[in-house]
Amino acid sequence: MTEPKKPMDRQKKEAKARTMPADAPESFSTATLEGKNGKAKITVLPYFDWDDDWRQFADRQDFRGLAESILDDKNFAKWVEVRPTVRQARDFVNALEAQTGEDLGESQAS
């Protein structure tokens, strides 16, 4: 009997935990995220450590999906705890874009 395939989210959770590289400077792509439950400094993983699906989330303005794709487990937990609104998440992404010069999708305010 073949085992049913696991949903993608469950596979992700069972994968090895993602952590910030030890050599990443503290100031590396860090911005403050404000949300319903306060605020936190969030540090983004180096670009080459991002999941390859990050662009799809950015273009759809799926900020939680984007966060899960570009943050390590510790910083993603902060994101979830802070609970940003769409506007607050967009402000965070815009701050990262200004800092890094990277275009993170259709996140500009309308």
Image: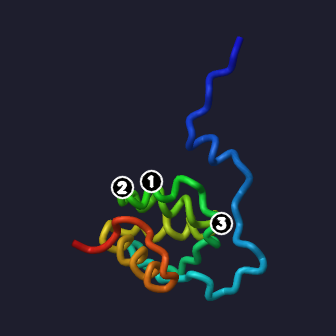
The residue that mark 3 highlights is 48
List the single residue furthest toward the bottom.
Answer: 27
Residue 100: x and y in percent read 52, 82
Q: Residue at x 45, y 71 (%)?
A: 82
Q: Are marks 2 and 1 in contact (CB under 8 Å)?
A: yes
The three-letter code of the residue at mark 1 reads Gln
Residue 110: quadrant of the picture: bottom left
The residue that mark 2 highlights is 60
Q: Name the one closer to the observer, 49 or 27.
A: 49
Quarter of the N terminus within the rendering: top right
Callout 2: SS? loop
Q: Name the one closer to the observer, 30 or 73.
A: 30
Query: Which mark sits nearer the N-terminus, 1 or 3?
Result: 3
Residue 56: x and y in percent read 44, 53
Residue 55: x and y in percent read 47, 58
Q: Residue at x 44, y 56 (%)?
A: 57
Instruction: Tell me the CA gap for discs 1 and 3.
Output: 16 Å
> Which colour scheme appears in the figure?
rainbow
Q: Is residue 16 left or right of residue 75?
A: right
Residue 19: quadrant of the picture: bottom right
